[in-house]
Image: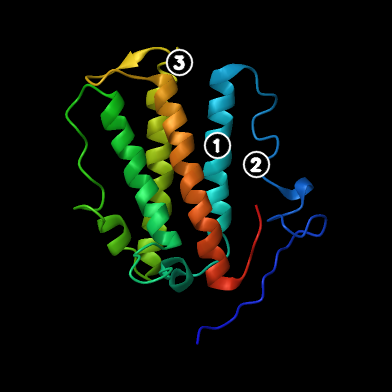
Amino acid sequence: MTEQLERWTVATVHPDMWVDPDDDPREGQGGPVEGELDTLRDFLAGYRTTLLMKCDGLDAEQLARRSVPPSTMSLLGLLRHLAEVERDWRNWIGDADPLPRLYGEKDADFHGAVADQAVVDAAYADLAREQAATDAALARHPDLGERLARDGITVREMLVHSVEEYARHCGHADLLRECVDGRVGQ
C-alpha cells in the first residue's frame, strides 16, 4: 500500500494555488506585454518559472524520485530533459553543425537523473545556460514570420512549440510534485 500524502499549499488566498497572487514570481516579470512576440516570450518565461517553482525546496532524492513505474519521469529528469530540448531547438534554428546531446543517447536525460547533489546542481546550471543561449539565438530574429535554418521553421512556430513543450511538462511537474510531498497548486 502506498503512503497517502496530505495535500497542501502555501497559498492562503486560494487553496488551489501554489502561492498567493502577491507572492507569485510569474506576475509582472517584464512589465506590460505588447504584441504577439512579447506575449509568446512572456508565456515561455512564465512556464520556465513554473517548472523551477515545482522543483523548489526539494532535496536531491525528492527531485530524482520516479513517478509511477515503469515511467522514468522525475522532476530532475524534467529539468535535464528541458535543458536537452533547449539545446535541440537551437539545432532547428541554426545553420551550423548540430550541437551534441548534453546527456548522451535517447532518454539519458531521464535515466541519468539520480539522487546526487552534483547531478542536481549540473541540471540547474545546464538548464539556465541552454535557456539563455536559446533566448539569445531567438533575439536575433524578431520577425515572427522569418523562416530559419534548413527546415524553414518560423520564429513563431519555434516560440509556440517552446510554450507547448514547457506547458506540457509543467503539467507533469504538478503531478510529480504532489506525489513527492503533497504540495498542490497551479
Label 3 sits on a secondary structure element that is: loop
Disc 1 packing (10 Å; few <14; some 14–19; many ≥20): some
Residue 90 coordinates in the image, percent (x, y): 31, 31
Image point (45%, 15%), residue name: 144
- Number of residue marks: 3
Residue 125 coordinates in the image, percent (x, y): 40, 50
Which one is in front, 69 or 28?
A: 69
Residue 43 coordinates in the image, percent (x, y): 57, 34
Q: Which residue is mark 2?
A: 26
Residue 87 horizontal side relative to residue 22, left or right: left
Image point (64%, 30%), residue name: 30
Mark 2 or mark 3, whichever is nearer to me: 3
Label 1 sits on a secondary structure element that is: helix
Image point (70%, 47%), residue name: 24
Q: Amino acid at mark 1?
A: Ala
Q: Which residue is mark 3?
A: 144
Q: Which residue is mark 1?
A: 45
Mark 3 or mark 1, whichever is nearer to me: 3
Residue 153 horizontal side relative to residue 36, left or right: left
**Residue 122 occupies which quadrant of the picture?**
bottom left
Q: What colour scheme has been applied to the protein in the rendered image?
A: rainbow
Q: Give the spatial CA distance, label 2 vs label 1.
A: 8 Å
**Residue 9 occupies which quadrant of the picture?**
bottom right
Q: Are marks 2 and 1 in contact (CB under 8 Å)?
A: yes
Q: Amino acid at mark 3?
A: Leu
Badge 2 or badge 3: first in the primary sequence: 2
Q: Amino acid at mark 2?
A: Arg
